[in-house]
Image (cartoon, rainbow, N blue to C red):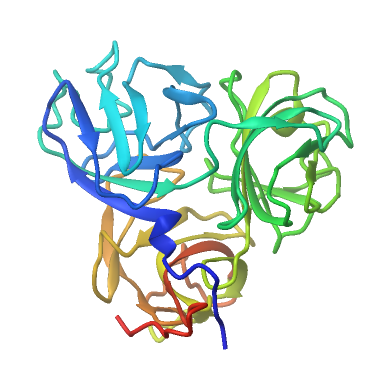
């Protein structure tokens, strides 16, 4: 039976919802931790980018997962403080720019839009890590298996970067911060070390040594190819996820093309689930336990698109995984192969032997 040493997953990951107020700034509270990696999206309006902010790069630096754009500095707003239970934000110098918003910035035309932020706890502002041939700055949480890694590439196949987890990452996201035309490149253990896949794209990915030098990450380092997406001579940011029993899962499944769909075992009741079909082109897609607080999960967003939230029957979150209720190609087409990342609302059985309840 699955168990976990993380009895309270909301100490490390939590989804937060809010409605914009067209203000000049905003303080968000109510989390059980200091959020150090935040991924957000306007839910009810199209043509607005996803955004990510983290404590290592700083609260004034935005990246947008759905595009290849370089890092933006303050024009859309900034986090002025990462607080013990949330964050404080102010508007940027370009508050009417119709791309990234966290709060219907003053002068925006959104007017009371709804938002989602997915929040992860890391390990503070970051420390120097010399485990790899490239020195990195790392903010790592070894309990929950998440780290933020900043480094400058050297265009050398076989170069290594320390990630600080003390465990093998199963999912990795890398973005060149300075280059405007280079993809968000991902490693997933189910695809192996010869393939890479792109968060900003519907592509099934490709087979190449340029991403990971055909080398599986170790408990200390990530090995890089000489490709520009993961190891050019600019500064890059890397997000690393190791699997923790009862809290996180990074696996694969095969669709059955039926509304009595495939069951995916995670060992916990999910709070967040993101999937991508890998045998052909398809969208990345996300569901969570806050935009839907009961089954069936219907509200989905697409990391590679600017689209507003869509509502269709997708899946049931159950005590030990999820059960699909759709034949959509983005989730459950017959014979389709998919990768996923999932985080827990509660473990099936926690380290204190308390079982989770059904939704």
Left or right: 346 with respect to 275?
A: left
* Location of residue 252 with respect to 316 vertically, above or below: above
Q: Residue 107: x percent and y percent?
A: 14, 18
Q: Is residue 28 above or below residue 181?
A: below
Residue most extreme to the top: 93
> Residue 7: where, in percent of width, then height?
45, 70
Q: Is residue 47 above or below residue 164?
A: above
Which of the 4 image quarters holds residue 261? bottom left
At x 31%, y 40%, the residue is 86
Please tell me which residue lies in front, 52 or 353: 353
- Horizontal and vertical percent for residue 201? 54, 43
Count numbered badges in the picture.
Answer: 0
The residue depicted at 46 percent of the width and 39 percent of the height is 36
- Name the residue rendered at 57%, 89% in the picture: 1
Percent of width and height locating residue 49: 36, 34
Judge from the rendering whether residue 244 lies leftward or rightward of residue 71; answer left or right: right
At 56% from the left and 54% from the top, the residue drawn is 281
On screen, residue 282 versus residue 103, left or right, reads: right
In the rendered image, the quadrant that contains the C terminus is bottom left
Is residue 83 or residue 45 the one in the foreground?
Answer: 83
């Amino acid at each position: 039976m699955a168990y976990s040493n993380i009895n309270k997953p909301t100490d490390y990951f939590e989804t937060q919802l809010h409605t914009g107020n067209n203000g000049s700034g905003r303080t968000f509270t109510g989390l059980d931790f200091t959020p150090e990696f935040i991924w957000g999206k306007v839910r009810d309006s199209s043509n607005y980018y996803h955004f990510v902010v983290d404590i290592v790069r700083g609260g004034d630096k935005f990246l947008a997962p759905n595009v290849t754009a370089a890092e933006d500095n303050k024009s859309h707003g900034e986090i002025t403080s990462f607080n013990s239970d949330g964050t404080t934000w102010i508007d940027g110098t370009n508050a009417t720019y119709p791309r990234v918003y966290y709060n219907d910035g003053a002068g925006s035309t959104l007017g009371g839009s709804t938002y989602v932020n997915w929040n992860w706890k890391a390990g503070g502002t970051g420390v120097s890590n010399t485990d790899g041939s490239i020195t990195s700055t790392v903010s790592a949480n070894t309990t929950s298996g998440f780290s933020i890694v900043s480094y400058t590439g050297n265009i050398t196949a076989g170069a290594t970067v320390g990630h600080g987890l003390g465990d093998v990452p199963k999912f990795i996201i890398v973005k060149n911060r300075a280059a405007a035309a280079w993809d968000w490149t991902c490693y997933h253990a189910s695809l192996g070390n010869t393939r890479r896949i792109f968060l900003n794209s519907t592509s099934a990915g490709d087979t190449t040594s340029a991403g990971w030098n055909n080398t599986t990450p170790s408990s200390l380092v990530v090995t890089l190819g000489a490709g520009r997406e993961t190891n050019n001579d600019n500064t890059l940011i890397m997000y690393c996820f190791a699997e923790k029993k009862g809290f996180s899962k990074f696996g694969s499944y095969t669709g059955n093309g039926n509304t009595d769909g495939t069951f995916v075992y995670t060992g916990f009741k999910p709070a967040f689930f993101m999937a991508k079909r890998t045998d052909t082109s398809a969208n990345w897609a996300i569901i969570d336990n806050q935009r839907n607080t009961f089954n069936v999960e219907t509200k989905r967003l697409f990391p590679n698109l600017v689209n507003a939230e869509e509502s269709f029957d997708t899946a049931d979150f159950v005590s030990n995984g999820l059960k699909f209720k759709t034949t959509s190609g983005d989730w459950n087409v017959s014979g389709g192969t998919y990768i996923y990342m999932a985080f827990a609302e509660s473990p099936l059985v926690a380290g204190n032997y308390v079982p989770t309840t059904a939704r």
